[in-house]
Amino acid sequence: MSGDDTNRPVHGTVAGDAYVALPPTAVDATASGPTRLIVAWPGFDPPRAATALATAIPMTGVPVWRVYLDLPGRSPGGLGSGSILETESIEAYCAAVENAARRLPDALAQIRRDLDVPDGPVGLAGFSAGGAAALLAVAHGVVPVSTAALVAPVVAPARAARAVEKRSGSERAWSEHAVALADRLDLGALAGDIAGRDVPVLLVGGAKDRVVPAREITALRDELRRHGGEAESTTFRMGHALAAEPGTEPRPPITEAVRVDGVLTDWFRDRLATLAPGADEGAAQAGPGGGAAEASGDTQPMERRHGSWSSGTGNAPDARTGAGLGHGF
């Protein structure tokens, strides 16, 4: 672990996986309730590393520690769009997602010691494969979770592979074991388990996403609601990635990341924070379009109204697709 004072990021490792923790430096809000940590995982597509995700969506306005944790066994170069069709790659994906959820209790225990943060429920966040890991952790109840926000979570690896097959003209070469692993991570099939944990869930999708189409995000939202869960979704006009290639190092955030950061910041502030007297509710917006997302297709955008989310007509400007946006995990 490194970090000279409480206002600087803390870097450390947990079971060989690197993390970076951003301290609660928000000046217009204080933490309310017992949650003092948000844990977020990157994906196999940019941003692929904890430090890159921390730069893309720092959630600076949320007055709790935001801990960005590498996925177990993450390949430094990530997985290209065609590699998901290979048995070795899909097995690596499934192992990373399942191990991230399984290791979370031990990782949290060490991180709490490193940061001197007391026990309590956590917030969970994640992008792509990291979003799948967060939802799997909720479904399995590995730790108490107060709320979760996921950006383009891979809802079903098998359907993501079919999309790659159609684009590439190639066919997957999965072993029977790989097929079984992928089916085990179909989040739609786990909707009842996720909803049963009573964890408010925000799902963020991209209208131009060719890995996790927006319709999969809204279908998962509807399935969670059907099982009695509290779930909201919103869609930006963006592709799958939240950073330019290679997505393994901290870089200035692209437009899509700035807007997603604003939505996640509002979501967690509404549930984990109390505004300081006289504070402007919109102060935490991280840029243009930070609070409401312009939807397309069958999604319902959300507007932030007096500290809560509700369905409405978004009016945020169109988010332009950033350069180098990948279509793998």
Image: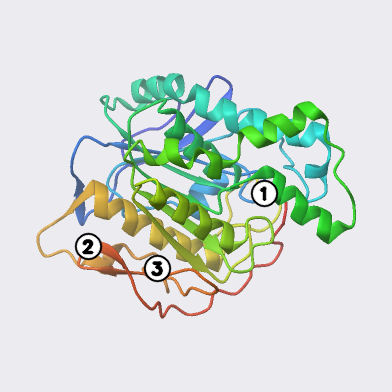
Gap between marks 2 and 3, in whole Å? 14 Å
User: Which element type, helix, strand or loop, lies under badge 3?
Assistant: loop
Q: Is residue 234 above or below residue 114?
A: below
Disc 2 to disc 3: CB gap under 8 Å:
no
Q: Amino acid at mark 1?
A: Asp
Query: For residue 290, which numbered disc appears in the image?
Result: 3
The residue mark sitting in front, 2 or 3, is 2
At horizontal 82% and vertical 59% (from top left) the residue drawn is: 166
Vertical placement of residue 255 versus 225, above or below: below
Give me the C-alpha separation between circle 2 and circle 1. 32 Å
For disc 1, the neighbor class at 10 Å (few under 14, some 14 to 19, many from 20) is: many
Q: Callout 2: helix, strand or loop?
A: loop
Whole-percent x, y for residue 273 in the image:
22, 49
Q: Quadrant of residue 232?
A: bottom left
Q: Earlier in the sequence, mark 1 or mark 3?
A: 1
Say which amino acid is labelled 2. Gly
Which residue is at the far front? 226
Whichever of labels 2 and 3 marks the residue nearer the N terminus, that label is 3
Give amino acid for label 3: Gly
Q: Is residue 9 visible?
A: no
- Residue that sits furthest to the left in the current view: 277
Query: Is 241 or 54 nearer to us in this picture?
Result: 241
Task: Point out which mark residue 136 bears.
Answer: none
Rendered residue at 43%/60% (across/down)? 233
Q: Identify the residue position indicated by label 2 in the image.
A: 307
Q: Which residue is mark 1?
A: 45
Question: Could you tell me residue 267's position as x and y percent?
Answer: 33, 55
User: Residue 112 falls in which quadrant of the image?
Assistant: top left
Q: Earlier in the sequence, mark 2 or mark 1?
A: 1
